[in-house]
Amino acid sequence: DTGVSQNPRHKITKRGQNVTFRCDPISEHNRLYWYRQTLGQGPEFLTYFQNEAQLEKSRLLSDRFSAERPKGSFSTLEIQRTEQGDSAMYLCASSPTGAVDTDTQYFGPGTRLTVL
Amino acid sequence: AQKVTQAQTEISVVEKEDVTLDCVYETRDTTYYLFWYKQPPSGELVFLIRRNSFDEQNEISGRYSWNFQKSTSSFNFTITASQVVDSAVYFCALSEVGTYKYIFGTGTRLKVLA
C-alpha cells in the first residue's frame, strides 16, 4: 500500500500569485486532512474531509484558502493572492474509518511553500 | 481548551544513552487519543504510537517505550540506547474522539551524537 503523496514538494512564488497543491491519500482512506507547519512549530489543523464532504475548517483558513476533494479521492488546496505569511510546510494526512487504526492519521511528505 | 505542551525544545545525548521526551496535555474530555510522531530531516511525519484515554498500560516496542499517566496528564516517550538515526523532531499530539483533528505540541528536537 503506497503512502500519502503530495505535489509539488516545493513551490516558490511571488506575493500575490495563486498556488495549488495536490494530495493523494492512501487508497480507501475516507478521511483527508490538511495542516500547516511553520518553522519551529507543530502542525496546525486547517481542514478535513470525509469522502467529498468538507466537515470542518479552522479559523486559520482565511477566505484566500480553499480546499476541495471532488470525488472523495485526491484533494487540492488553493491559496489565492499569496502573502509572505503563507510561507510554510503544508501537510496532508489521511485516515481510515471502521478499521483497527481508525482515527490514526498518516502523513505525506508535505509541500514547502516560499512566498517571495 | 485542548493543549499539548512539550517543554523540552532540544535535547542532545551521546549515542547509547537513554532519553525521555516529555509531553503534558490538557483536555476537558474524558475520551481522547494521544499520539507520538517522528519528523526526520526529510520532513515527513512518521506515526509511532496511538494510545486511547482508557488504556493506561505502558507500551514497549523495541527500544521505544511510552508511559501514560492520566493522573498527571502526561504521555512520555523513552528511547533506550539511542542511535544517531533517532535524531529527529518528535511531536506529541492529542485528539478528542469524534473531532478527528489533532492538536500538536511544539515538538522536541533530539540530537544523538556519535
Image: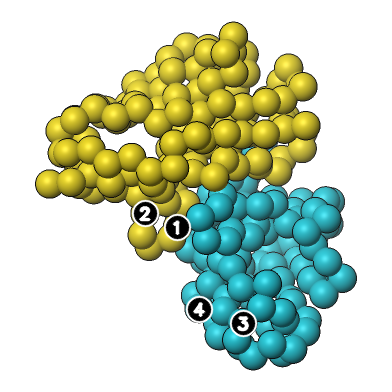
Q: Secondary structure at mark 4?
A: strand
Tell me whether the residue at label 1 lies in contact with that at label 2, contact meaning CB atoms closer than 8 angstroms.
yes
Mark 2 = which residue?
B40
Residue on which the image places disc 4: A10
In the image, A71 versus B65, the foreground residue is B65
- Chain at tag 1: B
Residue drawn where x is 44% and y is 18% of the image: B67
Callout 4–callout 3 Cβ contact below 8 Å: no
Tag 1 and tag 4, C-beta contact below 8 Å: no
The residue that mark 3 highlights is A115
Three-letter residue code for mark 3:
Val
Label 3 environment density (alpha carbons within 10 Å; few <14, some 14–19, many ≥20): some
How many marks the image carries: the answer is: 4
Which residue is identified by label 1? B44
Q: Earlier in the sequence, mark 4 or mark 3?
A: 4
A51 lies above or below B113: below
Marks 3 and 2: in contact by CB < 8 Å?
A: no
> Is the same chain shared between marks 3 and 1?
no
Q: Which chain is yellow?
A: B
Residue type at mark 4: give it.
His
User: In front: A52, or A7?
Assistant: A7
| Same-subunit check for callouts 1 and 4 | no
Disc 1 and disc 2 on one polypeptide chain: yes
As measured in the structure, the alpha-carbon distance from the residue carrying label 1 to the one carrying label 2 is 7 Å
The chain that appears cyan in the image is A
Label 3 sits on a secondary structure element that is: strand
**Numbered disc in front, either 2 or 3:** 3
The kind of residue on which mark 1 rests is Glu
Q: Residue B64: tell me if it is visible.
A: yes
Tell if the residue under mark 4 belongs to the same chain as the one under mark 3.
yes
Q: Residues within 10 Å of mark 4 (few under 14, many from 20)?
A: some
